[in-house]
Image (cartoon, rainbow, N blue to C red):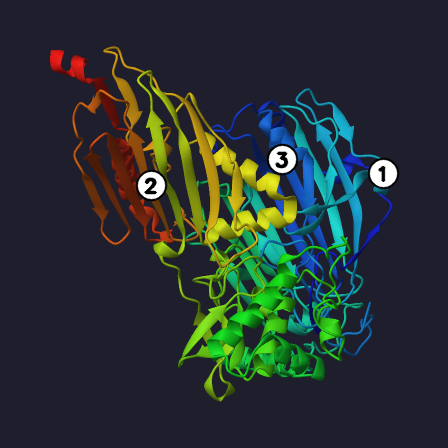
Amino acid sequence: MRFHAVLPFAFLLTLVTVPRVVHAQFPPVSREELTMTSDPKAPGAAAVYLYREETEDDPHAFRTIYARIKVLTDEGKSAAVVHISYPKTFVFNAVGNNSSRMASGTANSWDAPSLNHLGEDQPWDTDTYIGKVEIGALEGRVIHSDGTIVPLTGKPSELLKAAKGSRGSETTFTMPAVEVGSVIEYRYQVRYDRYLTAPDWKLQKEYFIHKERFIFRPSKQFLPQQSKDVGAGDSQLKDPHDNILTDIRFKPVLPAGKTLTTDAMGNYVIDLTDVPPIPNEKFAPPLTDRAYAVDFFYTYTPDVKDYWQLQMGFWTKALNSYTAPTEALQNLVKEIVSPSDSQLEKAKKLYEVVQKIENTDSSPDGAPLTGSEWIPRGKAESVLLSKKGSSNQIAFLYLALMRTAGISARPVRISSRSLRIFSAQYMDNIQLDTVLVGLELDGKETLVDPGTRMAPFATLHWAHAGAGGVAMGAGNKAEVIVTPLQKNTDNSTLHVGTLNVSPQGAVSGSLKIAFIGQKAIELRQLAIKSGVEAVNSEINTMIAQQVPAGIKATVDHVVYLDDPGKQLLAVIPVSGSLPKNANGRIELPRNFFEAQEQNPFPPESSRTLPVDMRYPAQEQEQITYVLPAGFTLEATPQDTNLKWEENAAYQLRTKVQGSSITNARILARGFTLLDPKDYEQLHDFYQKVVTADQQSLLLAAAQASKVQ
């Protein structure tokens, strides 16, 4: 067998005839299930799974999925749309009676798919192919609370819909006439043309599950002798490098006290009851490694070090050949850098070149860039740049340029933190979806992220900071690495400017907002994808949720949108009026951009997941109010200083000088991931921040102040 990563746009979906539904094929629905209007085990639930089952039969290359769902509210009617889950990885027999291939399993394909991405790629590997996947035995019915049965009927082309999802293509079908009180029931098979696939069971769903059962029948060689049936493949399992796959392993995330069992037939089985829904908590980390699941994989060694050493050895050998210096690369380096440049200067200049390719969707005449505009076609680079859009391709190009320029560099393979947390014990390199480049500069390694659009030199996309992975170290030894986390000063938002206040409370002036780090990357990527107006709209939406009521503040223009090496700067004209209180005082917000602030961390009775803020960050504000003639500040507010261990700090000061008042605020958050047990302290700290931010400054006319 050979092991292959499945690329979402690469397989051929075959639609087979949908059989006429025979209602007797489904278990009878009880009266209790039909009349259920709520579920005491899941109070307030929109829907619940009454039962679900998956059976994976690797020797016969198919997966069967069955589910019965009770719809309890209007929101629960969305369960009518069923998302088909495809196998993540395939293996097939190298020799034997089940060795049918869709494409060569021996050739390395480095032509990654072109994706419209924002700094991250889909998982991929060096062995890719076009595989045939077939959806068959699709049947279903909807039973209304009065017992009326509506069968799933229609042509396959009408039922199965393919569309692009958030992480690639997906296929769905929709159950008919679903209403509140309905029971939805369906069954289908995913067939993979005599291929095999170690399953990844998703044991937790968005709805409460009363009962579920999962069965995995592995490759024939892992079954007891008495259970090996006729028709199943019996050839050896091999990976793309002819290593014989001798072990089957699994990565479990299970409820406390639950274990995976093996029955007498050699099948892996798990039965669960009363499974809670996937937690839906604000600022939750990716649930790939936290939701209940079991991920199986075939491997050639049970030793973690051996596995990664061999995998990285094969991958690095191919990559080194692929990125070897060519005449075209040498000519480009000579054109861009000077012999007198330092290593750092060379690295930055060549980084700018590859970022131009990455950050440009089209040439001046509107035609898509293929890379040939930048590098003449050679034996490797023409392949590398033949399809623009893969961030890993850009990283490979930068690696090749560094080596051509004589700079010591190595590829660093990581798991994007937006998708998962890397686990060395999970011996499947599909985890390693992103490539960074480590540069040896001034005696230390500097990580760069050339594949992330609009990332400044030596700035990583947030999902690539604090991310685990594998790289080749000294002596060509594979080593597990974790990329450095960012600091709060790496990601700042600054608000500065001056506002003039009239005796009637009218406000006018100009403010500037500067973005540094991740927010700047995000806005610049938005500009590439949707244009400048989309950026203006995004910033305007942000401002509208911050400034006082009655104030008009919208973007006039944005500066340095196309230069990731500088602060992204938005210029904001301000106009409008602020209210007077019952005593006729003009009431100014002490912090102009926090006038509508609410605690971002509301009280929670029970926090179960860590708080994932993606990256540390810092907010700064320094706004000066110029008072109208004859007006003074009634009372200067006290300064505020707050500190929560090493997690966060807050400082607010007000300075009165002549006819002006300047308020300076800093809120620094130093953590990226916070333990759920600390959530209450997090809420309390930010509640103190909100209280300080919501203070007002009262202005009174000098005569009124004297009367008082």
Q: Which numbered mark, 3 or 2, is in the foreground of this view?
A: 2
Residue 185 sits in quarter: top right
Q: Tell me the residue that label 3 is attached to.
A: 69
Amino acid type at mark 2: Glu
- In three-dimensional space, the C-alpha distance between marks 2 and 1, rounded to whole angstroms, equals 66 Å
Residue nearest the viewer, comparing 562 with 503:
503
Helix, strand or loop at disc 3? strand
Q: Position of residue 129 (x, y in %)?
A: 76, 67
Q: Residue at x 47, y 82 (%)?
A: 473
Residue 279: tell me if it is visible: no
Amino acid type at mark 3: Ile
Q: Residue at x 76, y 63 (%)?
A: 60
Q: Residue at x 64, y 32 (%)?
A: 78
Q: Tell me the residue that label 2 is attached to.
A: 621
Whichever of callouts 3 and 1 sits on the residue coming sooner in the sequence is 1
The quadrant of the image that shows the N terminus is bottom right
Amino acid type at mark 1: Arg
Left or right of 205 on screen, residue 185: right
Q: Is residue 330 above or below residue 28?
A: below
Q: Residues within 10 Å of mark 3 (few under 14, many from 20)?
A: many
Which numbered disc covers residue 20?
1
Q: Position of residue 247 (x, y in %)?
A: 59, 75
Q: Position of residue 637 (x, y in %)?
A: 18, 31
Residue 489: tell me if it is visible: yes
